Amino acid sequence: MCGIVGIASVASQTQRAWLTIGRDAMTHRGPDDAGEWWSADGRVGLAQRRLAIIDLSPAGHQPMHDASGALSIVFNGEIYNFADLRAELIAKGHGFRSHSDTEVILAAYREWGTECLTRFNGMFAFALFDARQQTVFLARDRAGEKPLFYHQANGVLRFASELKALLADPALPRRIDPTALDCYLAMGYVPGERCMLQGFNKLPPAHALLFDLQTGQAKIWRYWQLPELEATSSRPVDEATLLDELEALLEDAVRRQMVADVPVGVLLSGGVDSSLITAMAVRSSSQVQTFTIGFPGHGKLDETEHARLIARHFGTRHTELMAEDATADLLPRLARQFDEPMVDSSMIPTFLVSQLVRQHCTVALGGDGGDELFGGYGHYSRLQWMQRKLGPIPRPLRNDIALVAEKLLPVGVKGRNWLQGLGVDLDKGLPLLASYFDATTRGRLLATRSGWHAQAEDVLRSRVPVHPDLLQRATRMDFANYLAEDILVKVDRASMLNSLELRAPLLDYRLIEFAFGKVPSHLKATAQDKKILLKRLTARVLPPEFDRQRKQGFSIPLGEWLKGGAFRALFQEVLLDKDASWFDRSFVEGLLKGFDKGHSVADRLLSLVILELWRREYKILF
């Protein structure tokens, strides 16, 4: 795991110091080694911070060049099938000087060109300079586990793992993008290729970019997409066959992701996903380390008992780590680390977990992806109930109910978002059930800002997948948006701040294709149950006393913390600063009063605090 940064230009670059500064702004991503290289003509510069995982020797140093010197690469991530590809490429006549997966990418590109992407099983973001073709090739993994930001203007392409590395270049502007801001306030993250800063972009998951140094132009394309569902009512599925395939795929994915030249552990919460990963891990290794995190004083968050059951059953070397309570001064640090603000209070326990686990291992396997792939979220069941029970209500009446809820009910009142969702056609669209601020409240929040107008709803509608099945729409939407822009961002930034590599076996692309291409909706979630096929696999491989119905998100008692003390003081100091805050003071005061009355607005307040802390840290202009 690493941090990469670079530049490609039609003209030679004389201002080069920022590249070193940007690289070292990501030292947390790679404390083990650092490298920098410039082409002889000064038009391409590549730099990297290395967290050594595979081939710890100097042979794994980056930027890495092929034997001819024509190809140069910086790479962040892991290619889990690199050993298989290496053997195939050796058979085709390629030689290797290291045992690293980075060198395998170089050889794969020499053999297959940009089509090499279809061969990689892994999480990755890389930049590859081809001196013969005079191109720079960027690519990002299918699910979006590894980040890649870029800025293109005036024949110059700059790119980096984290936005802070690009902001080391003083020549780049720091102005907010109004559409991205609107999306953030509505959804809690900035979706797709958009970035919170004008002129910057994210390379979307499963996309590649080819920059031509002769013309200064870039071509972007999608190299992979979710498959269509094969099963139909006229072609029923064989559940036993599906279970066999699921078990085999998961076992192989875990086996591949256990490979490393450093200590590897499993984050074991005792839930369905992490317990299944533990079950598969012990098939690959007799010495599996599992870790569970306890939060003393917060009994509802304590999962140690459930994890202990799985650890005892499989005989793992189990460690229970106790996390200390978070302090308010952690928020400015996380706001700075996350580059773009995002709203997910579980960034705090994810950071604390990563900090503790890093003391014991460098790589850990987690259960991310299981909910999106196999229907684990509660709203999947509620949406289906809503479609069946409330769908027959005439659309005009439902629209009126939604409008009344938006106009009259205070933000944070339980059920408000669901009532607003009644206005959506569930045969084609999807409601934004996790909305933080709707168009009306965003208007009030930004009343002092000229030029703002609501755009997030249009952006959201444009991203809803076209599919006749409601559950397929919802899971595909969450995979491309919530998973990519919230969950995986949170995991990457919080873990890498602690120089810990977190891997997600459930996001092996073969499991993704299996889940979306072969598993019908009735084996994912119904109005009564969730994650159905995965739970049936637990009946095969987990102890009979395992609680299959337990669903507990990774959360913190934010509401309790905001009742007083340091967190409340920080929130008030940041949000009620009349000289500095972007937001309408009276509206924010209303949110705080609503919180004191019991309204569910803690995460909404967090969204505003994170945004303010972030834009002050990086001196962002409206």
Image (tube, rainbow, N blue to C red):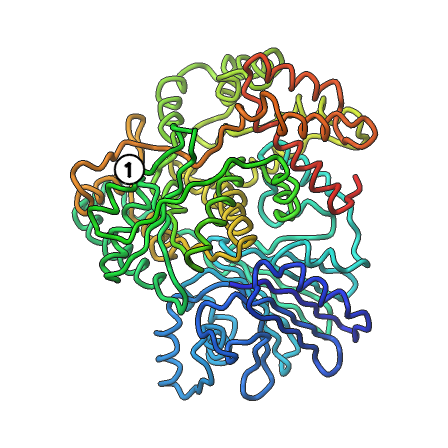
Assign a secondary structure to mark 1. helix
Quadrant where the image shows the C terminus = top right
Count of marks placed on residues: 1
Q: Is residue 233 left or right of residue 515?
A: left
Q: Which residue is mark 1?
A: 306
Q: Is residue 415 left or right of residue 307?
A: right
Q: Is residue 115 above or below residue 375?
A: below
Rendering coords of residue 332 (x, y %): 66, 41
Q: Is residue 138 above or below residue 98?
A: above
**Looking at the image, which is closer to me, 414 or 180?**
414
Quarter occupied by residue 74: bottom right
Q: Is residue 277 above or below residue 1?
A: above
Q: Is residue 570 above or below residue 490?
A: above
Q: Is residue 131 left or right of residue 308?
A: right
Rendering coords of residue 108 (x, y %): 46, 76
Quarter occupied by residue 233: top left
Quarter occupied by residue 232: top left
Query: Callout 1, which amino acid?
Result: His
Q: Dot 1, crowdedness within 10 Å: few (<14), some or many (≥20)?
A: some
Rendering coords of residue 307 (x, y %): 30, 41
Rendering coords of residue 390 (x, y %): 40, 17
Q: Is residue 241 left or right of residue 186?
A: left
Residue visible at 50% across and 53% down in the picture: 144
**Looking at the image, which is closer to me, 197 or 457?**
197
